[in-house]
Amino acid sequence: MKSVKIGDVTVELVRGNIAAQPDITAIVNAANAMLAPGGGVAGAIHRAAGAGLYEECRPLAPIRTGEAVITGGHNLPNRFVIHCLGPVYGKDKPEDILLANCYRNALKLAEENAIDSVAFPAISAGIFGYPVEEAATVALKTVLEAAPSLKHVKRIRFVLYSDHDLRVHENALGKLTKN
């Protein structure tokens, strides 16, 4: 695990399953607009959480690109799920601002709910087609910029699905922190 400390906030990078982070208070779902079960991250989270998650999500949908909403964790080991709709690369413009808004809005909800730890997947870097190198830079830059102003969130973890995605995020973090 690679990590950096920004003020009182630790930012961690790990390879793993976003739906299996028992030491994290809130995980972030790379959601679709209807907050429905799907493939990738959304499918994994909904399967692990059980049907109650979609029941709670349904009245909150649809959400717009860059928006975030919060629900309970249901059968997950996490107290909360924060659902973000990332941009579809090449379709939703400007992609970088919309993607940054996902991370900003998720952290805003975490702060509003006094959440101490949040785990993010690589939002939009799967089926939504965002190149992982660009997505990693936008995500980490946004989180590093937000970290000094966070009062409740003390740990932010990026949970990457593949070794390649982990290496890309490690490289981006190194460049952004000059480590």
Image: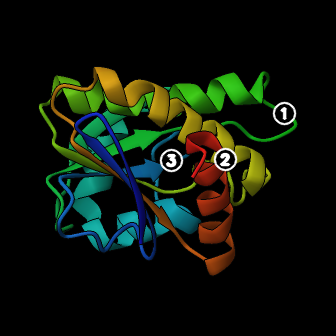
Q: Is residue 46 visible?
A: yes
The residue lying furthest to the right in this view is 90
Secondary structure found at label 2 = helix
The image position of residue 145, as x and y in percent, is: 47, 26
Q: Which residue is mark 3?
A: 31
Alpha carbons under labels 3 and 2: distance apart: 28 Å
Q: Residue at x 41, y 72 (%)?
A: 1
Of tags 3 and 2, the one toward the viewer is 2
Disc on res. 106: none
- Say which amino acid is labelled 3: Ala
Residue 109 falls left or right of residue 132 = left
Alpha carbons under labels 1 and 2: distance apart: 28 Å
Secondary structure found at label 3 = loop
Q: Which residue is mark 1?
A: 91
The image position of residue 147, as x and y in percent, is: 36, 31
Q: Nearer the viewer, residue 89 or 35?
A: 89
Q: Residue at x 54, y 25 (%)?
A: 101
Alpha carbons under labels 3 and 1: distance apart: 17 Å
